[in-house]
Image: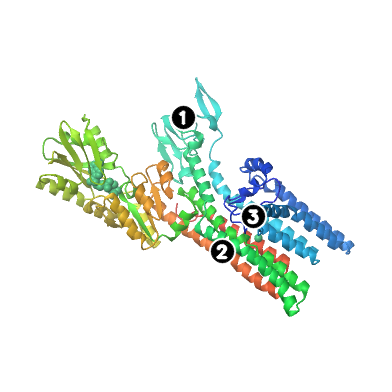
Amino acid sequence: MARCPSMSRPAPQPLALAPCSCSAPTRKHNHDHDHDHDDDHAAHDSHDHGIDGAWWQSEQFRFVLATVIGLAIAYGIGLARPAWSPWLFGVSALVGAWPVGRRAAAAMGRGKLFTIESLMVVAVAGALVIGEAEEAAVVVILFLVGEMLESISAARARAGIRALADLMPRTAARERGDGTEDVPIAALRVGDILRVRPGDRIPADGVIVSGQSTLDESPVTGESIPVFRAEGTSVLAGTVNLTATLRLRVEKDAEDNTIARIIKRVEEAQESKAPTARFIDRFSRWYTPAAMLAAAITILLPPLVFGGDWHVWAYRGLSLLLIACPCALVLSTPAAIASGLAAGARRGLLMKGGAALEAMGTVRGIAFDKTGTLTAGRPKVTDLLALDGSEDAALRLAAAVEQGSTHPIAHAIIEEARQRDLAYPTADDVTAIAGKAVHGRVDGRRICVASPRYAASEATAMPAAARDAIQRWEGGGKTAVVVLSDRDVVAVIAVRDEPREDARQGLAELRALGVATVLLSGDNRRTAGTIGQSLGIDVKAELLPDEKLGEIATLKSAGPVAMVGDGINDAPALAAATVGIAMGGGTQVALETADAALLRDRVRGVAELVRLSRTTLANIHQNIAISLGLKAVFLATTLMGTTTMWMAILADTGATVIVTLNALRLLRFGLRSDA
Ligand SMILES: Nc1ncnc2c1ncn2[C@@H]1O[C@H](COP(=O)(O)OP(=O)(O)OP(=O)(O)O)[C@@H](O)[C@H]1O
Ligand SMILES: [Zn+2]
């Protein structure tokens, strides 16, 4: 990670986002490193996915092992012939440092003088010059071992995402004639019919054409309760078919499958840098040269000015170089972010990057949209009051204009008309007025389905019966819409959208986390108020779409704000918030528009997201404290002369490993808490 894998065959590319040397912020991540050598390039790509085969089979490990054995032999011979010992150790150090030196030279070739590698090379060369060959050899070994440990643990963090990729079966049984043929997943085309036996994983996003079965969707969405899926419903690649054979029509090419897109998203997210990581990059840019300067001063100043011993101060100066190595610090943020993102993805919580994760960890307020977010988003018509003509006649008119609308209320009205077997005409000139109404022309009359507020301003008069019905229904948490025909009120229709099952609990969990919640609704005050009260959330109602943006701006002035919506018709509000979280409305749109997306339509997922983000932030802070703390301690002891060079590098390696292991703890996030 912080140190680049050193072998000619590029070693595991861990979390692609770790900068590969402390002092070269412009090198974005390890990959760049391998791209220095074109001949390595192809090898790199092909190994990228084989990373965590057996680490002990890697060339990196063999090299380290060889160096350790070499050192042991040198030590053994040195016992017999003490005079040879410095030379043997010197040779060991040079051989072990060879790959590091090559990388330092390559970086210098690109004009980057101050890298981890150059720190190492100068320190080792210096140690040899002052006759500390044994010390130099041990430093090199520890450095190599540290590098290897990092690769191994980093591969584990990355495996958090790769576990998702492993969900995909390699082949699928495609129907041909009477039987089936096994074809690789990549060869599947949209429209192919597949057979999936119980116990198999679904090979592609598709629709069930025959059969019904229970599916375990937890691998993809984190939803632990198996779901029943019958003919006509869609299924996701990577989920497990539990009970019966299904015939499936492929709806997506392999690379467009939801699971493939999730993996891609998370990998992209891991590459993106969090603000803290950017800060540390900038910090390293002057930090490493400063360390070199400090080392030079330590070596030169005491002997020249105060008559100090040359050997002693050269040794301390060189130790200082090793202490200055900021591997652990550079790694502290990206390692935690990568693990946090992977842990989230496994639980159906997707985030677009480190920035979103960091922001989410500091959020103090969260605004919710109502329809499709706190409620299921599938309202149903519950009451109908016809003032002029029959109920069916009114419903026909309403359905005619609602055909041109995508609003959930429109679906409810059309569904009701369908259930009553009503044939309805098509309306002309259908226009929707966002947040207010939809209107169109039917049989020469201007028909409008509108919110009561808008209707009141349009209608010539609002009959008392209509007014009463509206009041009563809204007080019961229903949404009333008024059907107008040429400015006459012909009917009032009530629809009801049920709150999500876990909405109440999810909001309570957020409050327990100290997050203020508010419902921003376009619905009328009474309806939204009733729902808000039953769920325990503050309400701002009767907001037009741009007024929602205004509310978010106001909230934002008090601190970072997240907005949770369905990601389809509230994209502007999601964009206006510090963090936009998409929920419901399918994963497809959500993944594109928002900073974060919940694959499971659970309000509790929002609380989980907050907890995960905060845990990740805390992890980052621990990592920074560990790396800087250890450096501070060893800085003091080195200048006092109580610790040696090899202890300094051991501290650096140790801090790096501790930081990596600490970050890996995040992968277990959520295993202990609820499910
Ligand atoms: N197509 C439509 N048919 C009937 N009424 C509509 C339509 N579109 C909007 N309205 C009216 O405008 C109101 C506000 O709509 P808007 O889309 O802003 O809010 P919403 O999405 O229904 O609710 P929320 O913002 O709480 O999710 C609705 O409650 C309804 O009365
Ligand atoms: Zn280091």
Q: Which residue is mark 3?
A: 150
Closer-to-camera residue (361/417): 361
In the rendered structure, which disc, 1 or 2, sits on the residue that comes first in sequence? 1
Residue 10 position within the rendered picture, expressed as x and y whole percent measured from the top left = 67, 46
Residue 358 position within the rendered picture, expressed as x and y whole percent measured from the top left = 47, 57
Q: Quadrant of the N terminus?
A: bottom right
Instruction: Give the residue type that dot 3 points to.
Output: Glu
* Left/right of residue 9 with respect to residue 468 in the rendered view: right
In three-dimensional space, the C-alpha distance between marks 3 and 1, rounded to whole angstroms, equals 42 Å
Q: Which residue is mark 1?
A: 190
Q: Which residue is mark 2?
A: 624
Closer-to-camera residue (283/450): 283
Q: Callout 3: 10 Å neighbours few (<14), some, many (20+)?
A: many
In three-dimensional space, the C-alpha distance between marks 1 and 2, rounded to whole angstroms, equals 49 Å
**Dot 2: element:** helix
**Dot 1: element:** loop
Q: Callout 2: 10 Å neighbours few (<14), some, many (20+)?
A: many
Instruction: Give the residue type that dot 1 points to.
Output: Val
| Whether residue 79 is visible | yes
| Whether residue 641 is visible | no
Which residue is rendered at x = 69% and y = 42% of the image?
39
Q: Quadrant of residue 363?
A: bottom left
In the rendered structure, which disc, 3 or 2, sits on the residue that comes first in sequence? 3
In three-dimensional space, the C-alpha distance between marks 3 and 2, rounded to whole angstroms, equals 17 Å
State whether residue 258 is above or below residue 278. above
Residue 259 position within the rendered picture, expressed as x and y whole percent measured from the top left = 49, 41
State whether residue 160 is above or below residue 652. above
Instruction: Give the residue type that dot 2 points to.
Output: Ile
Residue 657 position within the rendered picture, expressed as x and y whole percent measured from the top left = 63, 59
Task: Report the disc number at residue 78.
Answer: none
